[in-house]
Amino acid sequence: MNLSLKDIEAAKERIDPYINKTPILSSSLLNEWLGHEIYFKAENVQKIGAFKARGGVNTLSWLLEQGHRPKHIVANSSGNHAQAVAYAAKQFGIPATIFMASYASKIKVQATKAYGANVVLNKTRDLADARVAEAAQEGGTFWIPPFNHEQVICGQGTAAYEALTELENIDAIFTPCGGGGLTSGTLVSARGLSPKTKVFGVEPLNANDAAQSLRQGSIQRLASTPDTLADGAMTMAVGELTFPYLQQLDGFYEIEEEYLIYWTQWLTHLLKCRLEPTCAMPMEAIRRWLKTQKTKKRVLMIISGGNIDQPTTQKIWSTDCLHKPPM
């Protein structure tokens, strides 16, 4: 099935009662330094602190709309999707169990439990993925995957949909890419609302399974858990549903860890908001793309989340990047 703008609009109608319409931010100082107009869709102030709430709520709401009410919801996640499914399940009064890796952000684990879900920690992400597949076989159980489901993709696409109905003449959109749900949904929204807008995906160089897949023309899986501060992009492989959308992107960037740190510091300072390294990452891709442009551009970046724990915060701020302004 090829998703369309109508699918995104249907998702938006379903989720509107349960989510925040997040603001669009900008920094006049950053715009002055770079010589372009950059806008930020602030999903860090979304329900559960991340865009993932959109996909979780939409998928469960869609399921109920189809006349199916599961007895139990299960999911696998590195963190934000866990909270999203726990939040969605709570809204509709359905028990949820989330399978996570033991190295997942503690603040995300605690938040998932706080929404009422049962959390099962596993030694690795691969084990968590295997456990959820096994649990999904039980009668009356429905599995909401973190990205590889059409209704998850549609829900995530509503963030760009909102932004593009508010902003005109956007030349390019940049999103972080883990499993590809947000990037795929963004592509569908952009192609439907603003076909001239280019869409780019961005992932850590240290967890570049999507980039490898795009180069090889087939889905490539990482051999081991990636070493990256971008815990929201630590997926081992993209999905068979998201990969064809990633192949339609206008470009894809791989970003080194030092730039995750640099832009987390600078965007926190310039936008006066809390954000994760995963969602600061696209700013370096934006900077690199803008360096190749000969005319002034209007760019949109989706800030995917703001759930950052103390150990990661300490790593981010252990050195001072603010002495060197973005240029």
Image: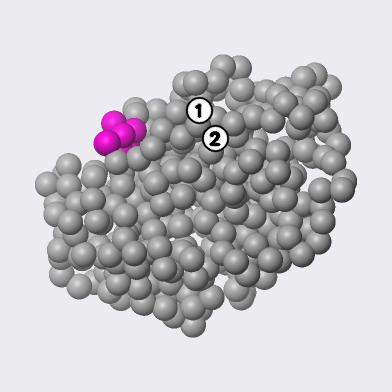
Residue in the image at 80% along x and 26% along y:
32
Percent coordinates x, y for residue 257 in the rendering: 74, 60
Q: Is residue 113 visible?
A: yes
Q: Is residue 230 left or right of residue 71?
A: right
Quarter of the image where one finds residue 136: bottom left
Residue 78 place in picture, x, y as percent: 49, 65
Residue at the disc numbered 2: 41
Residue 152 visible in the picture: no
Q: Residue furthest left?
A: 67
- Which residue is at a point 15% across and 70% down the rendered structure image? 139
In this rendering, is residue 11 above or below 213?
A: above
Mark 1 — residue? 163
Q: Secondary structure at mark 1?
A: helix
| Residue at the image position 55 percent from the left and 30 percent from the top | 24
Amino acid residing under circle 1: Ala
* Whether label 1 touches label 2, CB < 8 Å: yes
Magenta-colored span: 10-17
> Does 36 sit left or right of 227 as displayed?
right
- From the viewer's perspective, is residue 52 above or below residue 15? below
Provide residue 12's location: percent of width, then percent of height: 34, 33
Taking depth in this image into account, of 198 and 217 the one nearest to the observer is: 198
Residue 176 picture location, percent across and down: 60, 48
Q: Amino acid at mark 2?
A: Lys
Q: Quadrant of residue 326?
A: top right
Q: Residue 61 has which mark?
A: none
Q: Can residue 15 be found in the magenta stretch?
A: yes
> How many residues crowd around disc 1 within 10 Å: few (fewer than 14), some, or many (20 or more)?
many
Quarter of the image with the N terminus is: top left
The residue positioned 15% from the left and 63% from the top of the image is 71
Front-most of residues 144 and 22: 22
